[in-house]
Amino acid sequence: MPRTPRIPVLLLSLVPGCYSPNDDVIVSDGGGGSSEGSADSTGGTTASGGMTGPGTTDPTADTTDDPSASTGEVSDTEADTTGGAPVCGNGEVEGDEVCDDGVNDGGYGGCTANCMNLGPHCGDQQVQGDEVCDDGNDANGDGCNIDCVESGSVVWTRTFGVSSVYGVAVDDEDRVGAVTLGADLVRYGVDGSPDWDSTYDLPNATTTYGDSVAYLAGSGWIFGGHASTPTQSNNGWWRILDDSALPTETGSFNNASNGSDTAGGVAFDGSGNFVIALSSTTSDADVWVRKFDPDGQQLWTQTFDGGDTDAARSVTTDADENIIVGGLTTVDGQSSNGWLRKYDAEGVVLWTRTFGGDEPSPDWIRDVAVGPEGVIAAVGNQSDDIW
């Protein structure tokens, strides 16, 4: 398997930098403001931090020359304005005002002088200010994101001091987990700063390698790979961590003939079950797809044997909990071809596809992903090219 030195991890995401249709910065439901003091129905007044009520007096106060002490009048500074008319410019959206930022100079991302219109902003279909684009819709990934940044813009980059990074996943808070060749799972915050890292060493193994990682909210992070052992060749392994990097489950796999085993892909489904796609070398190389429930109990195992060398490189699930596995299978006269198979949630094969180039050279699928409508994307190698 080729190794690429010092692979950087790039996060392509959203960085809000301007007003967008989804920002709730200056638009309000007209709820109005509140006063520092409120009138007491018995005649007293309430002030912030003070005591109130009829008969309450300040022993230090001299009220002999204060007309309001005997007439009950309230000064202008103590007047209750809660029920007054909206005031454009007070920084609160009231009445029929559309916006009110307190300045109301009509500048970018601001409000006009009459509080009835937004100034130039992200989402008005005009490229202004620091905007790179502005298509005015609420869709990300269509070329222009909702924050008026071009889709696919690099947000941050981190470089590892290891030979390879073999897998990345993103959690529900846009944090990134990357697994390295050295079986180290590193999690980065939304700004690219490292949160934590966790390294796994399979017991009694000489060297442990990482190959893949996945995430599911409520279940945590799962990563897996293979480990060299003195007497059992390579063993496949997987480990689940919670969001604090504490391990909750760990497993390994060794075939009966002690051949080489690798957990080429790991994935969760929407119910918290997890799937391991293994490559297992016995008399030849077979693909094992094994599903576990959230407690780590095995539900089923399916195998694929194309007659010669076969290997699983990745696995994912779709919204219906179908399972898609990608890898390679050997074809006579074609070296290896890319191999893609879809199973239902019970392990029944739905279909299989193979891909080969014009030349009889090695082709394989390295990773797979599924969109919200069930469309499958695959990436891999065709001879010396990436496809």
Image (cartoon, grey):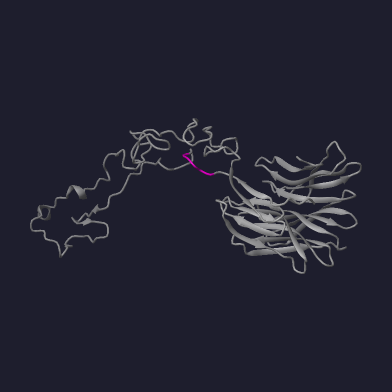
Q: Position of residue 54 (x, y in %)?
A: 18, 60
Q: Position of residue 47 (x, y in %)?
A: 24, 56
Furthest residue toward top: 126
Report the span colored magenta: 15-19
In the rendered image of this protein, does residue 358 appear above or below residue 15?
Answer: above
Furthest residue toward left: 65
Of the pair 112 and 139, the residue shown nearer to us: 112
Q: How many marks?
A: 0
Q: Position of residue 162 (x, y in %)?
A: 69, 56
- In the rendered image, which quarter is residue 350 located in? top right
Image side of residue 207 versus residue 19, left or right: right
Q: Is residue 242 visible?
A: no
In the rendered image of this protein, does residue 340 appear above or below residue 240?
Answer: above
Image point (59%, 41%), residue name: 153
Question: Per the image, is 22 magenta?
Answer: no
In the rendered image of this protein, does residue 294 appear above or below residue 145?
Answer: below
Q: Is residue 171 visible?
A: yes
Of the pair 257 and 73, the residue shown nearer to us: 257
Of the pair 256 and 11, the residue shown nearer to us: 11
Image point (17%, 49%), residue name: 75
Question: Per the image, is 18 magenta?
Answer: yes
Q: Position of residue 112 (x, y in %)?
A: 36, 34
The chief SS type of the magenta part is: loop
Image side of residue 128 versus residue 277, left or right: left
In the rendered image of this protein, does residue 158 appear above or below residue 253?
Answer: above
Image point (82%, 47%), residue name: 328
Image side of residue 251 versus residue 43, left or right: right
The quadrant of the image that shows the C terminus is top right
Furthest residue toward bottom: 204
Of the pair 40 and 387, the residue shown nearer to us: 387
